[in-house]
Amino acid sequence: MKTKFILLTLCMFALTLSAQQTTYKHEKNISYIDAAEKDEYRKERCVLDVYYPEGKKGFTTVVWLHGGGLEGGQKDLPNELKNKGVAVVSPNYRLHPKASNPAYIEDAAEAVAWVFKNIEAYGGDPSSIYLAGHSAGGYLTLMVGLDKAYLAKHGVDADKLKGLIPLSGQTNTHYTIRKERGIPMNLPVIDKYAPLNQVRAGLPPILLVTGDRRLEMTARYEENLHLESIIRSFGNKDVTLYEVEGFDHGYMAVPGCLLLIEWVRKHDKK
């Protein structure tokens, strides 16, 4: 399904939400791995930030995974997710070439497991955790949410995620993983590291968002359209695909985050 939206409406929506008077605290560089870890690179990269409304209880949390092709990038807090009544947890994870697949997915899963086990101490509701990210972060969102083995390793059921919101994520095996194997990045591969190959029945609600198919990275919209079809074929009904017309791969993250907030608010009411 292709869906259009009016950007002006979303901007007005965002401004309305931003007007809410709540104080937020931003705690940074919290380790999400075992204190006995000896690997210096893991100790450096496996940290996260927690941005949350002070003095509130039972709030929703969005775990936000940064992009960068699994080769770059840093944990970040998009402006569009600030002051919206939700907590945002932003993890770093190991990167190529210092790390290789599946280290990226394993780190993302461990960060998500940390949130399940610790967010209540900040006032958050552990039954209302959404997983989201842009580009490489979108890919990791799908892998952690679809392949239950990664979270199960930490005693967390992936079905307990309230929803998955990948923004312009690859649904084939990620091109950096192909690069590690000497495969051209524009040659598609679908193996166990492809979200397309991990679809199952009983998935949490999913919002897929891409940029304009004419401006996006190669076949990014088409990959997500394929994933939507496969998800539905397994009987999952709560899946939506938005194509943000006029926005390329990078800039689609801005309206994508606005769509994310709107979608989360609707699902929090269900």
Image: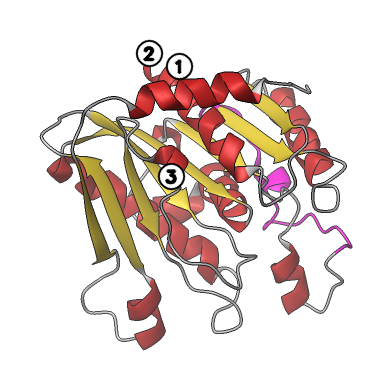
Instruction: Locate residue 87: give its quadrant.
Output: top left
Is disc 2 in contact with disc 1, using a CB cutoff of under 8 Å? Answer: yes
Residue at the (87%, 62%) spot, across then down = 186
Disc 3 target residue:
79
Q: Amino acid at mark 1?
A: Lys
Please state, as top left, top right, bottom left or bottom right, where the N terminus lies in the image: top right
Disc 2 target residue:
269
Residue at the (67%, 20%) spot, across then down = 6
- Left or right: where does residue 146 sit relative to residue 33? right
Q: Which residues are magenta?
A: 186-205
| Image position, residue 180 (x, y; %) | 72, 78
| Image position, residue 44 (x, y; %) | 35, 79
| Image position, residue 65 (x, y; %) | 48, 54
Magenta stretch: includes residue 198: yes
- Left or right: where does residue 64 sit relative to residue 173? left
CA separation, marks 2 and 1?
A: 5 Å
| Image position, residue 4 (x, y; %) | 73, 21
Badge 3 element = helix
Mark 2 vs mark 3: give the one in front: 3
**Residue 96 drawn above or below residue 56:** below
Q: Amino acid at mark 3?
A: Asn
**Residue 228 drawn above or below residue 169:** above
Q: Amino acid at mark 2?
A: Lys
Residue extending furthest toward the top: 270
Disc 1 target residue:
266
Magenta stretch: includes residue 7: no
